[in-house]
Amino acid sequence: MSEINSLGEAYKKAKYKVPGHGPRNVQVLKDALLDIDGELESEMYGKGKVIDDFQEKMANYLGKESAVFFPSGTMAQQIALRIWCDQKGIKKAAYHPLSHLEIHEEDGLKELHHIETFLLADKDSVIQLEDVVGLEEEIACLLLELPQREIGGQLPDYKTLEDISAYCKEKGIKLHLDGARLFEILPYYQKSAAEICALFDSVYVSFYKGIGGIAGAILAGDKAFTEESKVWKRRHGGDLISLYPYILSADYYFVQRVEQMNQYYQEAKELAHYFNQCHRVSTRPLEPVSNMFHVHFEAPKDEMEGILTAIYEETGIGLTGYVREVTKTASYYEVSIGDLYAQLPKEDLKKVFQLLDANMRSIKTL
């Protein structure tokens, strides 16, 4: 009997990992700071050359007048919606039922800012123009998440984005982009970040997801918007005495990886193809539209944990450290491709899927 008694332990012991850039350990920060002059002055309470330069760089990249660095996206997005609601005098906003603000923030928007929220579209679909037009309530702001993470990173087509943007402008609705994974979708849309962001009044991007930094986020928009966001940032306790470890690592890994997003995207499509060749396995979407997607198994969570653990032990390749239950007879996990995928021995990877297919075929009909 194997000494490994859990999927998580098996994944940690695997010689090769399929997703991500590598372990999130202190080395990530050490690498980012390796060539930084030790005499470089840190910023203090949101002021200084380190933060000013990075904010200007990101404003230019996103095609916005101004940008502000935040320690977290949760803080940045709640503040963005608060500003737009205050400006219009209507404390109502709309977003997808599986928005991060709705399911991962303990109702922060409602409890801290007393903003009433309206959920658009079916939870398994992205927001379409008809969902926005069909909303009878008058709202101050609409939030679109690109890609929609909780449903496998799905995206609306670009024409839909343009139509929603035009409709919001016509109706005086501010349009905010939850672009936590904005960099990752540029290859699919074949647009620049600035082109996409031009459709939105305000934009949030993350630096620890596809970019792989320590933490931190940018909130961008016009100058009046970002100046007001700085006031709310102070109110939220976001002006730490120094944020430079986050800023410097964000800048370092942005330079390292933003141009690699097309590679990650192509590799994600390759990996999804492998999964979709296996019995009782499918990806969502069927063909990824970014470097991320969900893998669904027609098998119970416990059974999949056993199957995957055995495969890791035999091949030395780990696909995931967890599996989540969908129903008693189905399970899934999320995968995001980064630097590690290119390092995989492809023949061993093919063996992983041969074993996965054989094991899935051996499962009794549920």
Image (cartoon, rainbow, N blue to C red):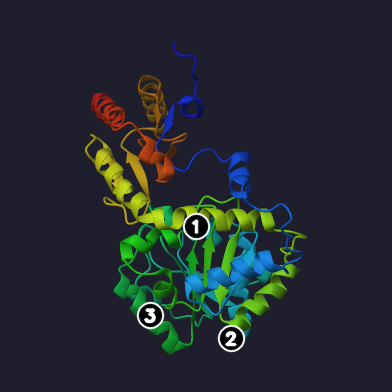
Residue for point 42% across, 78% down: 199
What secondary structure is found at the residue carrying circle 2? helix
Tell me if label 2 and label 1 are in contact, CB under 8 Å. no
Residue for point 41% across, 33% down: 301
Give me the disc on residue 52.
none
Residue 43 placement (x, y as % from top left):
73, 63
- 267 lies above or below 3: below
Residue 154 placement (x, y as % from top left):
35, 58
Mark 3: amino acid: Val
Q: Nearer the viewer, mark 2 or mark 1?
A: 1
Q: Quadrant of the N terminus?
A: top left
Residue 267 placement (x, y as % from top left):
32, 46
Q: Nearer the viewer, mark 3 or mark 2?
A: 2
Q: Nearer the viewer, residue 61 or 295?
A: 61
Q: Is residue 193 left or right of residue 23?
A: left
What secondary structure is found at the residue carrying circle 1? helix
* Mark 3 or mark 1, earlier in chain: 3
- 67 lies above or below 283: below
Residue at the spot of label 2: 88
- The reply to whether residue 144 is in sight is yes
Q: Is residue 170 left or right of residue 214?
A: left
